[in-house]
């Protein structure tokens, strides 16, 4: 069913789901939504399955003409948003009808927003996922960013019986000073003073920040004497913090599959949405935690999402 006509595409708007798993050995990155929490929340607010495809909107949002009655929700970064020129709040569902104009403007806080439509965005699956990988020209809408004139389809679904809203205490804020909890490794043995420098210093997000990785600027992270500057290329995962020859950290994101630089720490999964919402000029500080703490925080977050799903599904 046709649901949107794209009047203006925004800065960098793609279709994403949870990601494309099982193909990294072929050099295919996972892709998927960068902010997993905002992505999951958007789908919950319109009663979608956990892996329904959404629009991921970066910095500047699209202008969309509505082609069919549907329930929508926008989560993640705070962006100026109007429906037929009337202000609209994020983190709650709202109904649209044919002829409506949804205008999502420039970001005010954070970096990425997620637009879900009940029924999910309908594009062909490629390797088990609807996520766009622009670098490989696959998935999503013809493997590319949305552009003016595109017609976006959604699956059929029953309309919601009422408005669904995120509890205020579960809506994250996106301050410019960010603390990322991280576990040393997998190559922390390549570092000595460098590990202390990483955990004791502030770093600034550079302009080289995208779906592949976030390059930081700050004190140099030196590798121990007699250790090689690089390693044999190996699989990478989102959250790994590489130290390249210029000794400035790179936080790996979802469009990286292998790498040959040492990884000094790994950002825990529950904090990766903070990276996804960071913008150039923001400040990042790393905080050391244990693997046990990381597991505990992950289980706690999953329990909160399960409780939210149960709460929103009540009549």
Image (cartoon, rainbow, N blue to C red):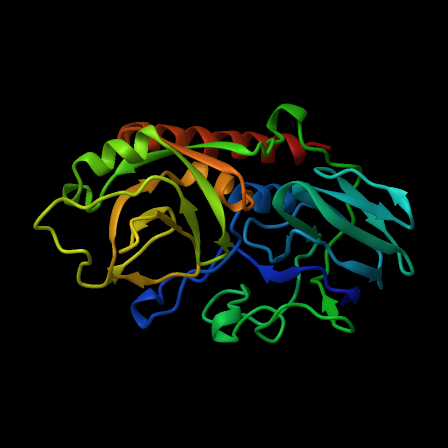
In the rendered view, does 302 fall on the left or right side of 173?
A: left
Residue 26 appears in which quarter of the rendering? bottom left
Position of residue 226 in the picture relative to residue 83 (left or right): left
Vertical comparison of 6 with 250: above or below: below
In-image side of 183 versus 140 (left or right)? left
Residue 100 lies in quadrant: bottom right
Q: How many marks?
A: 0
Residue at 33%, 47% (x, y): give it.
241
Give residue 201's position: percent from left, percent from top: 36, 31
Q: Position of residue 190 (x, y in %)?
A: 15, 45
Q: Position of residue 223 (x, y in %)?
A: 18, 46
Q: Nearer the viewer, residue 55 or 49?
A: 55
Which quadrant does the C terminus fall into? top right
In-front residue for pair 109/294:
109
Q: Nearer the viewer, residue 197 or 124?
A: 197
Instruction: State the image coordinates of residue 12 (x, y, percent, origin top left).
Output: 63, 61
Quadrant location of the N terminus in the rendered image? bottom right
The residue sitting at the top extreme is: 169
Q: Residue at x 52, y 75 (%)?
A: 137
Q: Residue at x 33, y 35 (%)?
A: 182
Residue at left 35%, top 47%? 249
């Amino acid at each position: 069913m046709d649901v949107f006509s794209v009047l203006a595409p925004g800065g960098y708007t793609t279709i994403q789901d949870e990601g494309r798993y099982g193909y990294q050995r072929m050099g295919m990155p996972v892709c998927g939504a960068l902010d997993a929490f905002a992505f999951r929340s958007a789908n919950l607010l319109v009663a979608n399955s956990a892996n329904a495809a959404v629009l991921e909107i970066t910095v500047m949002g699209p202008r969309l003409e509505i082609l069919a009655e549907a329930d929508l929700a926008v989560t993640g970064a705070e962006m100026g948003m109007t429906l037929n020129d009337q202000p609209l709040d994020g983190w709650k569902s709202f109904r649209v009808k044919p002829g409506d104009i949804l205008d999502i403007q420039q970001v005010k806080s954070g970096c990425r927003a997620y637009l879900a439509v009940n029924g999910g965005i309908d594009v062909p699956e490629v390797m088990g996922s609807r996520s766009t990988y622009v670098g490989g020209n696959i998935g999503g809408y013809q493997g590319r960013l949305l552009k003016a004139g595109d017609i976006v389809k959604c699956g059929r679904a029953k309309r919601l019986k009422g408005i669904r809203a995120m509890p205020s205490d579960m809506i994250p804020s996106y301050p410019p000073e960010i603390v990322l909890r991280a576990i040393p490794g997998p190559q922390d043995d390549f570092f000595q003073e460098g590990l202390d420098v990483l955990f004791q210093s502030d770093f600034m997000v550079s302009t080289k920040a995208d779906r592949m990785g976030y390059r930081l600027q700050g004190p140099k992270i030196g590798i121990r004497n007699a250790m090689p500057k690089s390693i044999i290329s190996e699989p990478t995962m989102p959250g790994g913090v590489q130290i390249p020859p210029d000794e400035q950290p790179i936080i790996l994101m979802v469009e990286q599959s292998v790498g040959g630089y040492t990884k000094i720490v790994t950002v825990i999964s529950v904090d990766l949405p903070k990276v996804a919402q960071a913008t150039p000029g923001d400040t990042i500080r790393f905080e050391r935690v244990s693997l046990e703490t990381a597991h505990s925080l992950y289980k706690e977050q999953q329990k909160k999402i399960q409780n939210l799903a149960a709460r929103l599904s009540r009549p």
